[in-house]
Amino acid sequence: QVQLVESGGGSVQAGGSLRLTCTASRSITAINPMAWIRQSPGEQREVVATITSGGTTTYLDSVKGRFTIYRDDAERTISLQMDDLTPADTAIYLCTGALGSRRYWGQGTQVTVSS
């Protein structure tokens, strides 16, 4: 059982930055990869970024060069540094990871970018 709790969302103007953090209730070393997903109303979920415990990362094309995902297994956290935000980045951002056959999700944090 793993609880994931996101924090750091909010409202910013276009061009601004936010940093999201996801804290796990237990070790995440065995959870590979961990990921940030976003969901906008009427849109499909998008995998924004993923990171393994070895530090291998992947990014959604539209966020490459603007977003950076970090992972700290000792602190049981993953973070998403989001720079040069645009209104298209407005969504609920959720962190997720699978342990064994079960996938765990946080409750999500809202990011709103105004033009």
Image: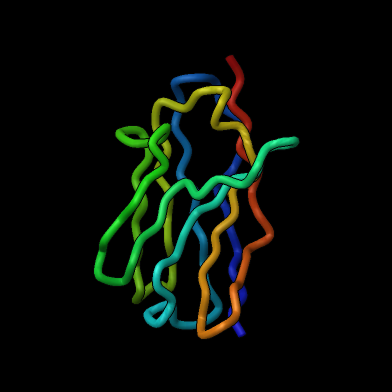
Residue at the spot 40% in from the left edge and 73% down from the top edge = 32
Q: Which colour scheme is used?
A: rainbow
Reply above or below: 59 against 100.
above
Left or right: where does residue 32 sit relative to residue 26? Answer: left
Relative side of 101 to 110, left or right: left
Q: Quadrant of the N terminus?
A: bottom right
Front residue of this view, candidates 6 and 36 = 36
Query: In terms of image quadrants, where is residue 73?
Result: bottom left
The image shows residue 52, relative to residue 87, as above or below, that is below
Task: Judge left or right: residue 114 versus residue 79.
Answer: right
The residue that appears at 50% across and 50% down in the rendered structure is 47
Q: Measuring 68% from the left and 60% from the top, which residue is drawn there?
A: 107
Establish if 48 lies above or below 74: above
Task: Count up the numbered dots.
Answer: 0
Check the picture and name the quadrant holding the C terminus: top right
Residue 52, horizontal then vertical, whole percent: 33, 67
- Residue 41: quadrant of the picture: top right
Q: Which residue is drawn at 31% across and 71% down?
A: 53
The location of residue 30, given as percent across then percent down, is 40, 82
Residue 31 position in % (x across, y down): 43, 76
Whole-percent x, y for residue 112 in the image: 63, 31
Q: Which sits in the foreground, 13 or 85?
A: 85
